[in-house]
Structures are given as C-alpha cells and as structure tokens.
Image (cartoon, rainbow, N blue to C red):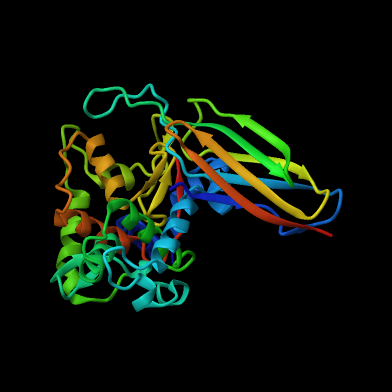
Amino acid sequence: MRRGLLVLGLLAAALPLQADDRRSSFLDMSPATQAMQRDDSLNPGMLWVLQGAQAWSQPAATGGPSCAGCHGEATQSMRGVAARYPAFDAALGRPVDLGQRIAACQQRVQPGAADAEAGLALQAYVAHQSRGLPIAPPDDARLQAPRERGQQLWTRRLGQLDLACSDCHEALAGRRLGGSPIPQGHPTGYPIYRLEWQGLGTLQRRLRACLTGVRAEPFAADAPEWVELALYLAWRARGMPLETPGVRP
Amino acid sequence: MARTLITLPAAVRRDAVFQVRTLLQHPMESGFRVGADGRVLPRDIVRRFRCLYNGELVIEAELSPAIAANPFIEFSVRAVDSGSLLFEWTGDQGFAQREQRPLVVA
C-alpha cells in the first residue's frame, strides 16, 4: 500500500502540471481587478466587444458582404469557435490563430477593409461568444508537429537573461516577481485588457512583452513561432474555461 | 468614433436612488509622454463630463491628465420623472460625444 502511494507520488512529481493544479491567473489578481473583469459594466474590454458587434453586422465599405452576411448571428455561429483556435487552415496550408483567421477571411471577402484595430475588436467579439466554454484544441494530426515545436520553444532558454518560459511559468509559478504574482501562463482571457497597456491586446502582444522582458529579440510579426507557442499553450490549458475579455494588471 | 458603455436600470420607482455607470473609450493621452520618434505626444484628454436628467444637470466632472485611458464614472441619481438621461463628454482636439438613454419612473 505504502509502495503504491509512493509510486503515485513519484508519478505526480514527474508530471509538471496536473489537471487539478492548473489555475487561471484571474484567481491571483487583486479583488478590484477581479471585480472589473466579472462585471460587464466595469470591464473596459467590453468596449471592444461592442465595437466588434457593430463591425460584425456592418457591410464592408469597399463592397462585399458583412460578417453577418455569411456567418449569420455570431451568438450562434461563433459559439465555441475561439475555444478551438489555433487551428489548421487548409487554404493557407498552415496553422492560424483566431486573429489571422479573421484577417484572412476579411482579405478574401472584404478586400481593402481590414485594419488592425477593427480586426482586434472582431476577435474580441468572436472570442466573447465562447466565454465560459472549455478550451478545446482540435484533434488534428496536422497540428501535431507545430505544437511540438511550440513545446520546444516553451522550454528553450532565450535572451540575455537566458530564461525559458517554463523557468518562470512552471517552475516558479505562484511565486512573485517584483511584487507581481507569476501566473502559470494559461491563455484563458485573450484578447485581454491590460491596465498596463490601457488597452486591449492579443496573446502575441503578451508573449512579445515576455520576450522583451528576458531581453530576447521578439520573432517577426508574421513568424510561425507565435502560432506554434499558442498551439502548445492552448493544448496545455485544454479544458479550462475561456474568460474573454479578461482584465489583467 | 468613441464608444460608450452606459449601465442604468430601465425602470425605477419614484424617489428611488439608482446607480449610473459610464465607460468611455478614449486614449486620455496625458501630454507628458514621448512617442517613438522622440517628440512629446500632444495632449488629448476628455476635459468635461456632464449628465443631464430631463434637461437638468445632475453631475458635472472635470477630468485631468492623470486619469487613465477609458475613463469610468459612476454616480447616483434620484428618480423624479420618466424621461431620459443625456450624457456629454467634451475634450481636446474637438472631441465631443453625446449619448441619450431613456428612463421609466413608475
């Protein structure tokens, strides 16, 4: 019996993060910031969701149908979609995140209409439709190799500080860095409203901030590394509920 | 175009005090920050907020450069008559935003 328990204990120690140990960084925030996210009338991210809702039903200025023209009511057609991204895009032949998927759709159907700010608002609106749903990475063999590359990136030491993502967000998660809690790094609330940014931003922007933080040169804006990391992070956070739009300090 | 998020009850009882929450999307550029080109970014803030209840002023606020982006203002109003609340924000560079919300007093 005792030996059985010991084996179990060793198994638990070997797995870096048990399903039960995973926690959203929402739980580590101050009560004020938590209240801000919980209440839609306080959450500044809802301004972008609102903007996205308007953009959803607005026909493109350059002609071409609106998003609603093809996809109908987002509350039904987009429910659960954000929880499945990043996903493999057959037309582009590579995995894409939600923002890239929306941008590709806009370029195809509403050429010349896409701008970054409106794209971010649409992303927030679409992701908001999946709030409360568990992150569900698709079971797609074509995603296997990019996801593994993402996992390698997660554990690769980078920058002048010679730190890997996992050095802080796994080994030191739950402890503090300069007074701020170190989260486990689950992408549950994106796009998030960061008080530091005083605006809404994507997972890529957040990852870029971490890369700059360890004094590494961030990948190029369209580099595949971003999506590979996002693929691994989504798989790592599978089953955790989405919170979009999250609010973080 | 600025976007707003205004929360207030659709209907209230007469003489009841109710909460009004307003959230305005605005950069609130303080005028002290330096841009990527090394030049100081010109100040662009909301200067004034007013709320009129059936034409009568219920709150007026003066905003300053130290206030964060997307200013949130919450205040209480006593229900008198059915009608509407008019919200007005004005600021630098000709910024002006007006929103109106109906209110039913039972």
Choose between A150 and A57: the one closer to the eye: A57
Q: Is residue A243 left or right of residue A212?
A: right
Camera sees residue A241: no
Q: Is residue A102 above or below residue A90?
A: above
Left or right: A235 as drawn, with respect to A21: left
Q: Quadrant of residue A239?
A: bottom left
Where is A85 relative to B28, above or below?
below
**Residue B84 can be seen, yes or no:** yes
Q: Quadrant of the C terminus of chain A?
A: top left
Which percent across, then down, holds residue A40?
A: 56, 54
Residue in front for this viewpoint, A31 or A48: A48
Q: Give the quadrant of the N terminus of chain A.
A: bottom left
What is the quadrant of residue A90 in the picture?
bottom left
Q: Quadrant of residue A214?
A: top left
In the displayed structure image, the side of residue A36 where residue A75 appears, left or right: left
Q: Position of residue B1 (x, y in %)?
A: 43, 48
In the rendered image, the vertical position of residue A189 relative to residue A87, given as above or below? above
> Which residue occupies 47% across, 72% down?
A75
The front one of A185 and A52 is A52
Indicate the position of residue A45 as horizontal and vertical percent values: 46, 50
* Residue A23 point in image, percent of width and height: 44, 54
Q: How many marks?
A: 0
